Image (cartoon, rainbow, N blue to C red):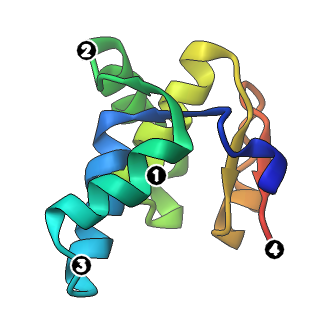
Amino acid sequence: MEELLGHIVMSSLNVSEVASVLLDSQMSLPECEEIIFPLISHLIPFDASQALMAASLEKQITHKGLSLGDRACMALGIKMKLPVYTADQVWADLGLTDIEINLIR
């Protein structure tokens, strides 16, 4: 997965989610910034079209219990026609046809 570093497109909503996890591990906000932002090549604001797409995804995959952050990631992938990457094995069985999901092991 190292080949993805420097080529990461990420929603601002997902950056917030990652920062929350890092802050929970006792990291400071400046430390979070130092770790997160050098890895991201394009930070995309979570906009109205992504919000609506994330809402529509909930109807399609509600039985899987995915978070808003999960659906925001998928919505951005669909909007930008880019593959998404996750370590969450549940995503493998979503049955979504308009997005390429790659599992990180």
State which quadrant residue 34 falls in.
Answer: bottom left
* Residue 68 visible at all: no
Amino acid type at circle 1 is Asp
Q: Earlier in the sequence, mark 4 or mark 2?
A: 2
In this view, 4 is above or below 92: above
Of the two numbered discs 1 and 4 in the rendering, the one whose residue sits closer to the viewer? 4
Quarter the C terminus occupies: bottom right
In this view, 54 is above or below 14: above
Q: Earlier in the sequence, mark 4 or mark 3?
A: 3
Element marked by disc 2? helix
The furthest residue to the left: 29
Amino acid type at circle 3 is Met
Residue appearing at x 17%, y 72% in the figure: 28
In this view, 6 is above or below 77: below
Q: CA distance from mark 1 to mark 3?
A: 23 Å
Q: CA distance from mark 4 to mark 2?
A: 32 Å
Q: Which residue is mark 1?
A: 70
Q: Which residue is mark 3?
A: 27
Q: Nearer the viewer, residue 41 or 75?
A: 41
In this view, 80 is above or below 12: above
Q: Is residue 2 left or right of residue 31?
A: right
Q: Is residue 23 left or right of residue 94?
A: left
Residue 48 is tagged as: 2
Q: Earlier in the sequence, mark 1 or mark 4?
A: 1
